[in-house]
Amino acid sequence: MSGLAQRLGAIQYDAQGRLRHLLTLEGLRRETLEELFTLADSLVEVGARSVKNVPLLRGKTVVLLFFEASTRTRTTFEIAAKRLSADVVTLDVPASSTSKGESLLDTIANLQAMQTDAFVVRHADSGAAHLIARNVAPQVAVVNAGDGCHAHPTQALLDLYTIRQRRGSLAGLKVAIVGDVLHSRVARSQLAGLHLLGVSDIRLVGPATLVPQRLAQLGARVCHDPREGLADVDVVMMLRLQRERMAGGFVPSDREYFELYGLTETALTVAKPDALVMHPGPINRGVEIASAVADGGRSLILPQVTNGIAIRMAVLAQTAGRGADTDA
Amino acid sequence: MEQLADACAALALPDPLLVGIETGGVWLARWLHERLGVSAPLASLDAGFYRDDLRLGGLKGQVRPSNLPPSVDGRHILLVDDVLHTGRTVQAALRELFDFGRPACVRLAVLVDRGGRELPVCADAVGLRLDVPPGQRLRLSGPDPLHLDLEAA
């Protein structure tokens, strides 16, 4: 494990080796992912009950701090925390003191003074969740719900969990990550997770503007030709074009992008016949993916959303539900 | 075990629903289900999410998915566990059961009652009563064959 990964691991585990924060998949132990998946298996069953709550986080207060727009992630975190019986507060950031000039850490300090137990943070700046994690009290957990272009660990976990649910194991699978890898925190977390679970054949597929050759440093093969990138793959993980992070002409036009890199039934013919199709959402139909594929039999886009609740329940249960420190 | 089966039969529950508590209780419930000729499908639960010590040490070990019917309203439930000790597992199991509805009654069947109760819980059907000294624990291994061991806690 590299020095950086060790440092990332160190901040995410407590002195007893329990998951304290989830900031990135880098630096985590493989067993941690397996434990989260096993726990999610049991929590999926809870979602199928008429009373969909278990008292794992009863009496705990979870604050959702979303400094960036989000529908799926925020909603599924809120449902996850409520299904664990936590009290949930969603901070209305545009109306909060942060827009009046209060610093991020002052905001956190004030929320901590209200006896909160966990923060779920989405922020436009890479490293925001780490900054908060380094400045919270020992009993407080921080979960990264996406920071800049850096990481989105729960999205990657739910993607990997969904593959595991369908295939039993990820060992030996061939995976293509297609689209705007350059700006994608999801892709970085997916790569870290795939490596951790022993997947070695990973291709990053897209135009040179969005998948520059230097991204091969992330431990994957860069393919600008989609036929080469999708050849014989078991899983196609599509990415959203992140125009909000693009400053300039990365893509000539939506139409041209779809012609070259959009996932269509034709493009999928080179993949395995039972290849799984995934997308973290929101999808741009007719730009990244054709409706026939998004709504077709191989698409796992909606099961990903469902699994997002169980995975986020597992993460909150392990971090916010760690129990008292016995090493103090 | 035959003594436990006889005690369960004597309860004369109408159309009982057998619910085994993971994991030893499930093995026993499976045996009782066959031995008593119960028609309702066997059910199971893992009360791990309902334990009263979660605040102290978080989740301990693997929690298995519960397998209960969507509603237990009006059902006569025979809750089965291997060893009855403090009563805390049974209390957690009852909390989970009541999230699935309002049973007509819940009866408790255990292979061994080792005493040492910390809550007002008592079994309705017992295979064996045994005084186990503190610092020792009974462990059922299985599922086939079922075997009971006394070991240091």
Image (cartoon, rainbow, N blue to C red):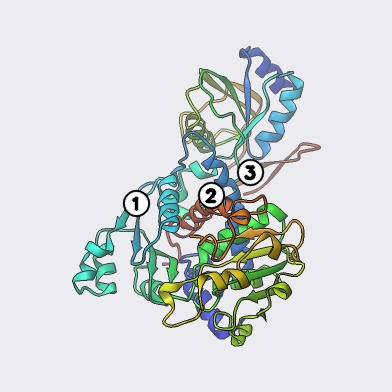
Left or right of B64? Residue A93 is left
Residue nearest the viewer, comparing B151 with B119:
B119
Tell me the crowding category of disc 1: few under 14, some 14 to 19, or many 20 or more residues within 10 angstroms, Cα based: some
Mark 2: secondary structure = helix
Q: Chain of mark 2?
A: A
Q: Position of residue B81 (x, y in %)?
A: 62, 32
Name the residue type under label 3.
Arg
Residue B137 marker: 3
Residue A88 marker: 1
Q: Residue furthest right?
A: B145
Q: Nearer the viewer, mark 3 or mark 2?
A: 2
Residue at the location (63% across, 56% down)?
Answer: A293
Residue B27 seen in this snapshot: yes
Name the residue type under label 1.
Val
- Discs 3 and 1 share one subunit: no
Disc 3 and disc 2 in contact, CB within 8 angstroms: no
> Quadrant of the rendered structure where residue B136 is?
top right
Q: Residue furthest bottom?
A: A214
Tell me the crowding category of disc 2: few under 14, some 14 to 19, or many 20 or more residues within 10 angstroms, Cα based: some
Disc 3 and disc 1 in contact, CB within 8 angstroms: no
Q: Position of residue A107 (x, y in %)?
A: 25, 68
Q: Chain of mark 3?
A: B
Q: Is residue B3 above or below residue A83?
A: above
Where does label 2 land, which residue? A306
Q: Position of residue A255 (x, y in %)?
A: 54, 69
Q: Nearer the viewer, mark 3 or mark 1?
A: 1
